[in-house]
Amino acid sequence: MPSEDRFERVTNLVTYLLNREHGATLNEIVEELPGWPSGSEARRRAFERDKRVLRDEGIPLVEEGGRYRIPANQYYLPDLDLTPDEQVALRLAVAAVPLGGESADLALHKLLLGGGGAGDWQGSASVVAALDEQPLLPVLHAAVRRRQVVEFRYREGGIRRVEPSLLFFRDGNWYLTGHDQGRGGALRSFRVDRIVGGAGDIVVSAPEAFERRPTSPGDVMPREPWLIGGEERDTAVIDIDAVLAAKAVVDVGGRGSVEHRPDGSVRITMDVTNRAAFRSWVLGMLDHAVVVSPDDLRAELVAWLASLTVAREDDRTTPGSDRAMPA
Amino acid sequence: MGRPVTDVGARLRRVLAMIPWLLESGGSTVVTVAERFGVSEDEVVRDLNLVMCCGLPPYGGGDLITVVLDEDGTIEAWPGPFFTRPMQLTPPEGFAVLAAGRALLAVPGSKPAGSLASALGKLEAALGASGSLAIDFDAPPLLADVRAAVDAHERVRVAYYSAWRDELWERVVEPLVVHSRDGRWYVETRDATTGAERRLRVDRIRSLEHTGERFTPPDDVAAPDHVFSPGADATEVTLVLPASAQWVVETYDTLDVEPLDGGRLRVRLLVAGDRWLERLLLKAGPEARVEAPPEITGTAASAAERVLLRYR
């Protein structure tokens, strides 16, 4: 069917259900609103598709005893009763931190109209931080605050059932933290961009399904990648040239001990529980960093580097071998 | 059909926001609405035509909103009984505002007890969302100094480590705007002597000295949409990466990604510095290869040999 008609039908559905306090049955909806295909099976399928649009848009559709409604108190937040200064502060925040999505734009339109003085809301923003837009964020955030168990397909490990307790942003990525029911309730963090599918593919339970325990990003995921992971703990010693010493000290944070040398270089002693992440960090400093000990960690790094020099020999003997492979 | 398939959801969201917006402002023009909502004027007219005929059964018209669209593009709007409530945020909009506010508050130098914090408290209470969302910015030590210089329009002398070229330089620059992307902080600068514009990563500024000299910032200062803008001397490089190097695609801007067998990827990207490519290849490991251009296929090996010298 033409998308214009479908769009009109969905818009009508929202305004209709939002205004019927006691909701409506599918029969009533089809009777009172135009734009439905003929035939009960085709109508049911069209309604299912429309329901999915609403779900994907985070519009709350409640079904009770065969009646559908959109509760206005869930569709809108209550009046926030902001002071003029607070109104301006929120405008500034939305202007300075583009989330990239339409919800943020629309919120800004509303905030701009909400009074609180004109203010030069655009002018004074010397800091602009971009948070990556992820279409799943509103539905996941709703699940956190309403304490709904979420079921989703994750790129690693398939279907997960999680009691979500926190949504957080770090280093360009959004994470959902929660107790993983399929992993004995262990507290895990999932990259939101690795959740497969759209908002409509996420299955949410009834609200208030679990107790939410307060957590912070630092509790669930150390900032230092080489401390994320359950490998046996090593204590590594690494020498770093002056040119990168300051940056390395910041990277390690308070979690290592630093010995400053007269030439500006540093020797850092630090814990490692994820060797691959440690290797990446060290190699990111190219020839400005040397692993001093332990011997096996040093040997591992040397072997990795040596394998990279061997790879070049392969390239020479089988040039373009990859291109020759059947598609 | 001349148009791409319409995204029903996105359009629904727009129209549902456009109606109260028009009512609140009592009217507008097609041009203004198009600008506000980032769509074409044709699309605005199409949306308005729909709004004019949408309402509640039994279709008397004007239940929802009365819109008059003049030929000169003027829009007048009166409310029907439905959209008379004050402008209120929906939960997805509330989330967007909360995320933006928490982010701004997480920036070092922000007032933890100001209007923003109290507004966010109210928003969180309305969402029932206390403690549900956190923004964890890793703030480099010099960020507060850089921000202060931007706000004061003050020239600063910086010593900077250029990772692209693996070299340290020192210059006096005019810091224009600070912004964050993918968890990293950047400052757009203008060279005080040559006027050359440079983007610096704040965590690579080794030292910063305030000069006390003021400058007049250009009128059109804005943070860029994209942080990666390779210069004219950037090289297009084709890599074949193992499945374990998926992070390359997730982390960097690519021109093209082609899936190969076994989860491997053929990736085309622009490289603006040899050292940058060396780092990428050393991390990606022996299964990663440079496919083109041919003169740099030995990059990983020569970088590995150079690092190995430190272990002999």
Image (cartoon, rainbow, N blue to C red):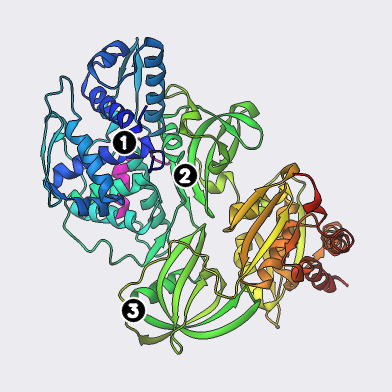
Residue occupying the point 71% across, 58% down: B239
Left or right of A134? Residue B305 is right
In the image, residue A154 sits, relative to residue A217, either above or below, namely above
The secondary element bearing badge 1 is classed as helix
Indicate whether residue B121 is drawn in magenta.
yes
Give the main secondary structure, helix, strand or loop, of the magenta stretch. Answer: helix
Q: Identity of the amino acid at label 2?
A: Gln
Q: Residue furthest bottom?
A: B193
Q: Is residue A80 visible?
A: no
Q: Which residues are magenta?
A: B115-131
Residue occupying the point 34% across, 48% down: A104
Q: Identity of the amino acid at label 3?
A: Pro
Q: Nearer the viewer, residue A317 or A188?
A: A317
- Name the spot of residue B69 as percent of width and height, x first: 13, 44
- Name the spot of residue A30 as percent of width and height, x first: 29, 15
Q: Quadrant of the N terminus of chain B?
A: top left
Q: Which residue is mark 2?
A: A134
In the image, residue A245 sits, relative to residue A32, either above or below, namely below
Q: Which residue is mark 3?
A: B217
Q: Which residue is mark 1?
A: B12
Q: Is residue B160 visible?
A: yes
CA separation in Å, label 1 and label 3: 41 Å
Residue A42 occupies which quadrant of the picture?
top left
Q: Quadrant of the C terminus of chain B?
A: bottom right
Left or right of B82? Residue B220 is right
Residue occupying the point 25% across, 41% down: B46
